Amino acid sequence: MEWSTHALSGMVAGYTVTGGDWRGAVVGGIAGVLPDLDEPKSKFGMLFFFIAIPLNSIFGHRTFTHSLLFMLLAGIFIYPFTELWVALSVSAGILAHIAGDMLTGKVKFLYPSAKSVGISIPSFSFIWIDRFTRLLLVITISWVVLKKVI
């Protein structure tokens, strides 16, 4: 999926695990793009190329940073320095990213296991699935915001 779709899914996930806190949406949205730090050509990877290049050369794309292990380690690592809602939002945002990538391909969800998990799709379907998912996320976010305002 594209970075914007990952950010939106992370926002929804962070908002949800914090019981409707906008700060959870912000943290989840940022965490939603974090797994693509293993891809130097991604928006996030280009920004942090000094981390992305070594990560990619060691693990490859959609391996360690797209795993349950990475999600758990990120949440556990950040928890001592923040409040629980931040760690939960980070974990939820990362998990949302992984789930999105599993809709458009395979990831090493149980890394270090070599088994890949996800749906293999034809490359022409990627853009349609990504756009449809993004549209659903925008509708969901809009509905939540309007519900709070009205």
Image (cartoon, helix red, strand yellow):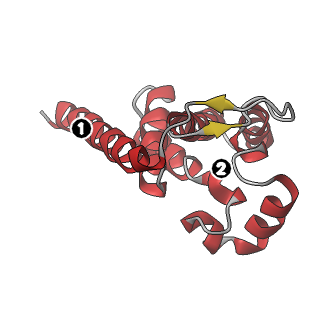
Indicate the amino acid at tag 1: Ile
> Quarter-wise, where is residue 129 in the image?
top left
Residue under numbered circle 1: 139
Q: Residue at point 60% right, 34% down?
A: 95
| Secondary-structure class at tag 2 | helix
Task: Give the x, y percent position of residue 102.
Answer: 57, 34
Which of the two labelled residues, at mark 1 and mark 2, occupies the earlier sequence position? 2
Where residue 87 appears, x then y in whole percent?
66, 37
* Observer-nearest of 4 and 93: 4
The quadrant the C terminus occupies is top left
Q: Looking at the image, can residue 81 be seen?
A: no
- Kind of residue sitting beneath label 2: Pro
Q: Which mark is residue 102?
A: none
Relative image position of residue 22 (x, y in whole percent): 40, 42
Q: Above or below — where is 2 with respect to 78?
A: below
Which residue is depicted at the point 62% across and 32% down? Answer: 88
Identify the residue under disc 2. Answer: 35
Residue displayed at 85% across by 30% down: 113
Local secondary structure at mark 1: helix
In this view, the residue in front, 87 or 49, is 49
User: Dot 2 surroundings within 10 Å: few (below 14), some, or many (20 or more)?
Assistant: many
